[in-house]
Structure formats: structure tokens, C-alpha cells
Amino acid sequence: MDLEDKKFYSDKWFSYLQAQICNHFEKIEKDSKSAKKFISTNWSKKINGGGGTYKILRNGKVFDKVGVNKSTVSGIFSKKFRKNILGAQKDGKYWASGISVVAHMKNPKVPAMHFNTRFIVTSKSWYGGGIDLTPSFKDKKEEIYFHNNLKKVCKENNRNYNKFKEWCDKYFYLPHRDEPRGVGGIFFDYENKNWEKDFRFVREIGMSFIEISKKIIKKKMRLKYNNADKEKQLLKRGRYVEFNLLYDRGTKFGLNSGGNTQAILMSLPPQAKW
Amino acid sequence: MDLEDKKFYSDKWFSYLQAQICNHFEKIEKDSKSAKKFISTNWSKKINGGGGTYKILRNGKVFDKVGVNKSTVSGIFSKKFRKNILGAQKDGKYWASGISVVAHMKNPKVPAMHFNTRFIVTSKSWYGGGIDLTPSFKDKKEEIYFHNNLKKVCKENNRNYNKFKEWCDKYFYLPHRDEPRGVGGIFFDYENKNWEKDFRFVREIGMSFIEISKKIIKKKMRLKYNNADKEKQLLKRGRYVEFNLLYDRGTKFGLNSGGNTQAILMSLPPQAKW
């Protein structure tokens, strides 16, 4: 398959997955007697090509704020930025398509969730992505369930789970606080062994995110909580903001590739405390 | 006067000013029938020398959260960071003393305030600092009062007010939002014409901050406001967080010089929304 086809199918998949995730999350809201729906916004890049669609559901009964963002952009990185990007050193050219999801929950007992997959093309081409959880309350059973499911998908697709898990722990870490952002998950990048198999892995990780997130949310969304629990969640969200603005590569990539600010910063919680 | 004396007097001045500012702000709280006081925390740098004292007053009647941070640190910058610092390229050595204040107000009609002055020594030595306002509501009269007072102090000390004002507008700007953080003020750096005169300017800017902030606060602290006003303030604070974590040089300097995280991030508001 030639590169243009790989780009075409990746882009289509991410759009399909975006619709699927939104449908599933709206169904969860509906089952909780909430009529809240995603509001969809299209945007186009001002310089160079591409654009995207970000869908945000706010102030639901289950989701306090959840953003599902899909974009496909291309262009030329600035000289300063291109040195950090594999295969872009020479001419700075890139094409990138991806989906990212961040869900901040109303109920502080339900962990915040993050999922992302992307296909990047410079003079090289590869998939990257990951899933991770940020609970405000420790739940060992939930952690084991979560990690085991990710392990399963990795194994079925002949991926190095341990490497991806360690990468995730290392990546979602706040050095200035000396604390992890959450309980980790998987993080992968530069996957370019065999395109068909890589693409299959990326699709399965996407479908797994839907299954895993539904299971975790449904189990806890009706748990009772008090003001102190909510306070704990808001402070945890403050750390989430610190990570995303100080360290997150996706945020930096977005702001450096002329992305849409609303779409990039949809990851920020609806409310946070310090 | 030799360099060690300049360091000694700068350090002492910043400590004195910290005490003065805290006294004045506690008096404002007291006049509002609040017993809230600053809580003081000392910290020491783990690597290399120095430390500081940060004082925070939370949940007052006037101040929602105000931090007054004084620190004096020294050490050697990492190779990566030193290239950004004047006079530190060769060996990375630095000594720095300074005070910074960030006040987030309970009443959304009262602007958030920021003040900072510092003495930095590498192979060069200089003063820097600034004052700026971040209102959630437009108030042309207040802006004029504020800017005119800063102009006056600059003129009396033979400083280039227009340059400092433009620098401030340029610095406190969020490119990804294409909007300024607030209404500006002054920002200066690399002041090293004549130490006695530079030091005098720095002292007068400090005393002016006390006078200006008291006047602005007292005029507005009893104004009525509603939930929509508060909401507007919380969204403005979200922008404040974005600026401080994405762009602020002081935050980067602090995190790169082994500073105390609580002290560096005391600038973050008690609560913000997106």
C-alpha cells in the first residue's frame, strides 16, 4: 500500500472512532436521564493545510467535561521545533492525523481518562498513542483490571507491553511535584514495523478504550460522594493542568503546528483548584 | 560598593519589603473584619545554596489567595538552560534574590495583581521586575490611574517608561489566544546603569506597589457582584494559569534552578475554570 493510502485510511479510521466514542458516551448520559449531547465544531488551519473537528460535552450527569478531538493537519514546522520531530530535521514537512479524548467526570470517584492515537508522516511515518487513567481515589482492583486489559491488547498484537507501560509511567510524571499524574497505562510512539499490523493495533486500542472506559464509568458513576471528595478531585485536576501546560508533547505539538487552541486545550478540566 | 555588598543589601531589601507588603495586606483583611493572616513557610534548596520564605494568605474576605514570595538562591544552571541567561553561558553560575507577589481577589471587580523585583548575578549583574494588573472587568479610569502612577515612578528615576510599558504588553501576552493577559503595566530587565540609582528605582517601585494596590483594592473591595461576575473571573483565571505555565519566564527560572515548587506555583489562582 502506498503512503497516500495509509494516510487516507488512518484519517478515515480516526473520524469513525470519534463518532463511535461520542455515541457511546452520549448513551451513558442518556441512561443517566441526561439529555446532554456533544457540540461539534469544525476548524481549518490558517497557514498550510488541514483542520479538524472537536466535539465537547459539558456539564452532563456523568461527564463534567469530555472532549473528543480529531484533526488532520499538514505543513512545515518552524526551524526551532523541527529538530525535536523524527524525520523532520531536513525540511520540516509533516502530515499528521489523530484522535484524542480527555474525560473529566462529575463524580470524583470515577477516574479522569485520556486516550490518543495518531499517524505522523515526515520523511518517516509511524503510529503513536496511549491510554491512561487519573483517579483521585486509590482503587487497586480497578488498576489491575485496567492494566490487564491493555496488556491483553498489546499481547494480541505482538507489542511490547512492558515497554509501553514503563514509557507511560515515565511520560505522565510531574518532576516538580515528584509525583505521577495518575496510575499510568500505556504510551507508544514510532511504531512502524509493518503498516497493516500497526494499523490493526491502533484500531484495537481504540475499540478497547471504548470497552474499558464504559466498564469503569458504569461501575462507579452512581457512587455517593461528599464535598471533601469533590475538593480532592479539584486539587488533582490542578495537577492535571500543570502537566498538560508544562510538559505535554501533544499540547506543544498542537500550539507549534498552528492547531486550533480550543481543540488543543479541550483537555483542560472544567474547573480546578490549587 | 563591591558585588557582595550589593547582593547583601538587595537580599535585605527584598525581605523588608516582603514584611511590609504582608503587613499592609493583613491590615486590609482586618479592616474587613477578617482574622486571616499570612502563613509563612521556609524552604532550602536541596542542591547548591540558598532558599526562601513564602507567605500565603488564603480565603480571606478581600484576598482569595495572595502569595508573597522572597527567595535568595545560587548555583549552576544546566547546560541547556544557561544559554538563555545573560552572562551565564560560560560557566552557568548564578546568584539571584527577589520578591514576587501575586494576589487573586475574592471580589471579581477587583483586578488580580502581580509584582516582582529581583537582583540577578552571573558574570553580569542587573535588576529586573515589573507590575501588572489583570482585571476581569474593563475600567478605563482605573487603568489610567495605574499607568500614570507607574509612569511617575519611572520618570522620577530616569527610566524609560515607554520601553517598560511596551515590554510589559509584549511579555504578558497569550499568542495561542491572541489576547493580552491583562492591561499591562511595566516590565523591566537588565537594569545596570548605576547600581545605587538602579537599587533606588527598585525600592521605589516596591513602595509604589503597596500604595497603588491598596488604593485599587480599597476602592472596589465592597462592590456588589453576582454569580455571572464570579464566573467571568474564574474563566479569566484560566487564562492566567495558561500564561504562567506555558510562557512565564519566572516559572521556568524557578523550576530550572531547583526552586521550591510550592513557592513557584503560589502564583496559580485558588480556583479556575475552562
Image (spheres, coloured by chain):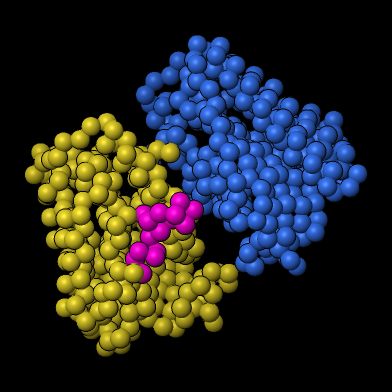
Chain colours: A yellow, B blue
Instruction: Locate residue A233, reporting x and y percent.
Output: 31, 41
Above or below: residue A270 compared with residue A134: above
Residue closer to the observer: A163 or B138: A163
User: Looking at the image, which residue is at 69% across and 41% down?
Assistant: B98
User: Looking at the image, which residue is at 33% across and 79% down?
Assistant: A191
Question: Is A171 colored magenta in this rendering?
Answer: yes
Residue closer to the observer: A213 or A41: A213
Total numbered circles: 0
- Left or right of residue A83: residue A134: left
- Left or right of residue B203: residue B102: left
Instruction: Locate residue A181, reporting x and y percent.
Output: 36, 54
Above or below: residue B202 compared with residue A74: above
Question: Is A243 colored magenta in this rendering?
Answer: no
Quarter holding the N terminus of chain B is top right
Q: Of all residues shown, which one is farthest toward the right? A: B1
Q: Is residue B147 visible?
A: no
Quarter holding the C terminus of chain B is top left
Instruction: Locate residue B257, reporting x and y percent.
Output: 61, 55
State which quadrant residue B158 falls in: top right
Residue closer to the observer: B179 or B274: B274
Instruction: Locate residue A115, reporting x and y percent.
Output: 28, 61
Q: Is residue A190 visible?
A: yes
**Residue numbers of the magenta segment:** A167-181
Above or below: residue B226 compared with residue A108: above
User: Looking at the image, which residue is at 33% across and 83% down?
Assistant: A192
Above or below: residue B112 compared with residue A269: above
State which quadrant residue A172 falls in: bottom left
